[in-house]
Amino acid sequence: MQISSRFTIATHMLIIIALEGRKNKVTSDFLAGSVGVNPVIIRKTLSQLKKAELISVARGTGGAEIAKDLQQITLLDVYQAVECLGKKGELFSFHENPNPNCPIGANIHSVLDKKLIEVQQAMENQLGQTSLAQVVADAEAKIPR
């Protein structure tokens, strides 16, 4: 199972908004053309990023802008804005009914729960150490002049 593409789509979009928004109005159609997904997905992601106060979107005429300094936005902020982690905020979900009469099923939570939480925390710590400014700079360095 893979983690959804919401996070990478949102990050792609934010890089475009940061770089292209300097000189052009960044619309959902423009974003969809670069990301390669349906504009409906782009609009939903824009809504999630706006709700998280990472971007602002102009009413009527459209166009998205970054709402904060790029150094103040981390990849963890982006991840938390768009990923659906369920009610408990956990990356890994568990099958609902392990058999309590099976020695493995009865103990699977005690075997895996702590490890899975540690994996999620390590990933989130890494994401929290990378600013949007860093990935925008990396992207800008790749663009031929």
Image (cartoon, rainbow, N blue to C red):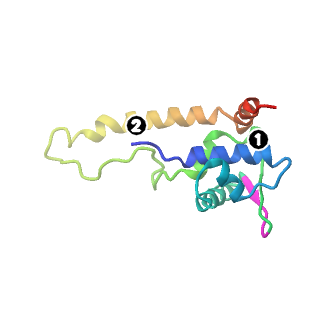
Residue 13 is situated, as x and y percent measured from the top left of the image, at 67, 48
Given the image, on which type of amino acid does mark 1 rest? Leu
Marks 2 and 1, how far apart at CA = 30 Å
Residue 126 falls left or right of residue 142: left
- Name of the residue lying farthest toward the right: 23
Q: Is residue 47 above or below residue 104?
A: below
Q: Which mark is residue 116?
A: 2
Residue 13 magenta-highlighted: no
Which residue does the image show at 41% across and 44% down from the upper left?
A: 92
Given the image, on which type of amino acid does mark 2 rest? Leu
Residue in front for this viewpoint, 60 or 56 = 60
Secondary element at tag 2 = helix
Residue in front for this viewpoint, 98 or 55 = 55
Q: Which mark is residue 58?
A: none
Residue 64 is situated, as x and y percent measured from the top left of the image, at 76, 56
Q: Are marks 2 and 1 in contact (CB under 8 Å)?
A: no
Which residue does the image show at 79% across and 46% down from the upper left?
A: 20
Nearer the N terminus, badge 2 or badge 1? 1
In which quadrant is the C terminus drawn? top right
Residue 74 falls left or right of residue 5: right
Figure quadrant of residue 45: bottom right
Q: Which mark is residue 70?
A: 1
Question: Which residues lie in the magenta part?
Answer: 55-60
Residue 135 is situated, as x and y percent measured from the top left of the image, at 69, 34
* Mark 1 Cα shell of 10 Å, populated few (<14), some (14-19), many (≥20): some
